[in-house]
Image (tube, rainbow, N blue to C red):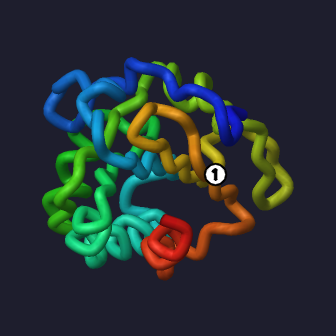
Amino acid sequence: MLNIGEKAPELLGRDENGKELKLSDFAGKKLVLYFYPKDATPGCTSEACNLRDNYERLMAKGYAVVGVSVQDERSHQKFIEKHQLPFPLIADTDHALVEAFGVWQEKKMCGRTYMGTVRTTFVIDEQGIIAEVYGPKQIKVKEHAEQILKVG
């Protein structure tokens, strides 16, 4: 997993509309890059809606927000439309970004083991350096924006 103090990768991926997003697109802003397991699941929806509800506050403090999961563009478009999400979602279908950040890991549920995205948020500073990392045990999906704003 990438750690605090490390440079984030320049190429982030393609959003729900197929637009390529790069770290340099967010120059001068702090980037909240949050990785989540799956569109339209309860925890992921709570997290996205919490960030949506606090989006103006985050922007006022100099943050941009981008979500990442391995679902495709169509899935992301539906998720954005249903919940009026004001920020882009990267469709990391080839797992390039989840692997680059180290959040594609072995998971266990109901006695089965599988590979999946571990809920993790990276706050990247204006120079592209990882300033903060929130792991799955730290993230409170219904209060995540508050967690970020307390630090920033």
What residue type is disc 1 on?
Val
For residue 42, say whether it is visible: no
Residue at position x 42%, y 26% in the image: 93
Q: Is residue 53 left or right of residue 123?
A: left
Q: Position of residue 152 (x, y in %)?
A: 48, 65
Residue reaching furthest to the right:
111
Q: Is residue 24 left or right of residue 129?
A: left
Closest to the observer, 56 or 151: 151
Q: Position of residue 2 (x, y in %)?
A: 67, 33
Q: Position of residue 116 (x, y in %)?
A: 64, 40
Q: Is residue 152 left or right of residue 3?
A: left
Closest to the observer, 79 or 48: 48
Q: Position of residue 53 (x, y in %)?
A: 27, 77
Whether 70 is drawn above or below 53: the answer is above
Residue at position x 60%, y 31% in the image: 101
For disc 1, the neighbor class at 10 Å (few under 14, some 14 to 19, many from 20) is many
Residue at position x 39%, y 40% in the image: 126
Question: Which residue is denoted by mark 1 in the rendering?
Answer: 133
Closest to the observer, 110 or 41: 41
For residue 6, say whether it is visible: yes
- Rendered-image quadrant of the N terminus: top right
The image quarter containing residue 81 is: bottom left
| Label 1 element class | strand
